[in-house]
Image (spheres, helix red, strand yellow):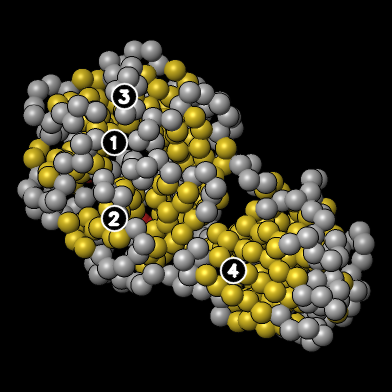
Amino acid sequence: MKPAALLLFCMLSSPAFSQQPADIFRFNRDIGSPKLAGSSAYDEVSQTYTLSGSGYNIWFERDEFHYLFNELKGDFILTANFSFVGEGVDPHRKVGWMVRASDDEQDVHCSAVLHGDGLTLMQCRPLRGAFMRDPQDQIFAPKPNYQIIQLERSGKALIMRAAHPGEPLLLIGKKEMENLPNEVLAGIFISSHNPEVVEQARIWNVRIDRPVADGYDPNTEGWLGCRLETMNVFNGVRRVIYETEDRFEAPNWMPDGKKLLFNMDGLLYKIPVEGGDLELLNTGFANRNNNDHGISFNGKLLAISHHREGMPGGGSTVYVLPLEGGEPQLVTKETPSYWHGWAPNNKEVVYVAQREGSPVYNIYRKSIDGGAEVALTDNKPGEHVDGCEYSPDGRCIYYNGSQTGAMQLWRMKPDGSGKEQLTFDEYNDWFPHISPDGKWIAFISFPPDIEFNSHPSYKRVMLRLMPTAGGAPRVIGYLYGGQGTINVPSWSPDSKQIAFVSNSGK
């Protein structure tokens, strides 16, 4: 549901279509003249980097290492997965993220580091030529062998976070780096801690995100760029298949598994799963579509939410049309109505809506062939529901609701009875999506400091996965996103992947 972003389909800029994303780093060099030359390789299929490098160390008053980096100004968030190749020679071989004042071997830097023996820590040189000190210039992680490492710059502060697979990011440390200039070098590095040895590491899920300030309003201050991504939910490996500076949202996976469908500038587009050219889907008169759209279980019909001029609440209205395109058929006369799920019988839809002038949203069920809508929830002022979606067997409707004072996942029977809370932690959980095999729930989690009835754009969010049969959620993705990231069903037909949108400024 997207009542706050009705301007999206009114944007006048035409889509700046881009090719499949490539290597994101511009510079590749050895720092400090190590005895043995380093190198880097990028696999375009897996979007994985392999770094090879030597160097005596990154310590004392000078450094030796191999560096793959960009020149960046202002604030940014660097996130990736890191793993060494082979057993290695020195247990203090190191890999990670580094933010550096220049390519001078003695210059100021702050690094988020994984060592060969699993030691994970933040290391900084606060002054050019200064001898790095133990422990004053280090902050140690509480556990070893972190795989996901993040280094964020916010003003003069450098902030390190890290996680083991499946866990939320943990704050490791924060350093004020007064002597880093506004324009810095930022990238991934490797050092062998032995000048006679070249070590290797693999780095994947590499993302450089440019955040916006707290309180940023995209409706008035502009939209950030978008990445269309796919992810294997069982190993967390992600691929970016499309990028543009324009706003797009909410991918659905097409029934044949070969294409994705998403909304942009009020229209719907298809794109091959491997990336490539966009194909406009014919939605007839419906040219003000929001991010609530999805495909029937039999793969024949598409539900959309199109805004009608002059109607209450922005006029979002549910329609259905053939998946191959055509003229939409009206389902909901009253507005606003935001589609979220199909019934497995392919004859009914569920949606969230405001009715009779009330500001409260509730979940409704309705036949696509007409008849009265059926209210499935009865919320009080201050309560909110969204993201209603059937299980493939038709026994449950999953949704997110704030009846307890926090946004959590719930499910109920198709008649609205038997409401059961599924998540209970501190995060604000939205948009539960059930895998086609009925075994898994993928959803987005907003941080605790976000107002629980809100799902804004441009936040540090997580994608999580939990069994429908019960069990603790595990984190499968760390990203900058929120509204439009995964609002609608986006599972691949084989129940192994999801598609979603992440965001970043320039």
Q: Position of residue 136 (x, y in %)?
A: 90, 61
In the rendering, which numbered label is found on residue 259? Answer: 2
Is 494 on the left or on the right of 324, as rendered? right
Residue indicated by mark 3 = 393
Where residue 88 sits, quadrant-wise, is bottom right
* Secondary structure of residue under mark 2: strand
Secondary structure beneath label 3: loop
Secondary element at tag 1:
strand
Label number found at residue 49 = 4
Q: Measured from the top left, where is residue 179 in percent x and y?
A: 77, 74
| Residue 184 appears in the rendering | no
Amino acid type shown at disc 3: Asp
Label 4 neighbour load within 10 Å: few <14, some 14-19, many 20+: many
- Residue 229, image x, y percentages: 42, 56
Which badge, 1 or 4, is on the more N-terminal residue? 4
Q: Identify the residue at image location x=75%, y=67%.
A: 110
Amino acid type of the residue tagged 4 in the rendering = Tyr
Which residue is the site of mark 1?
340
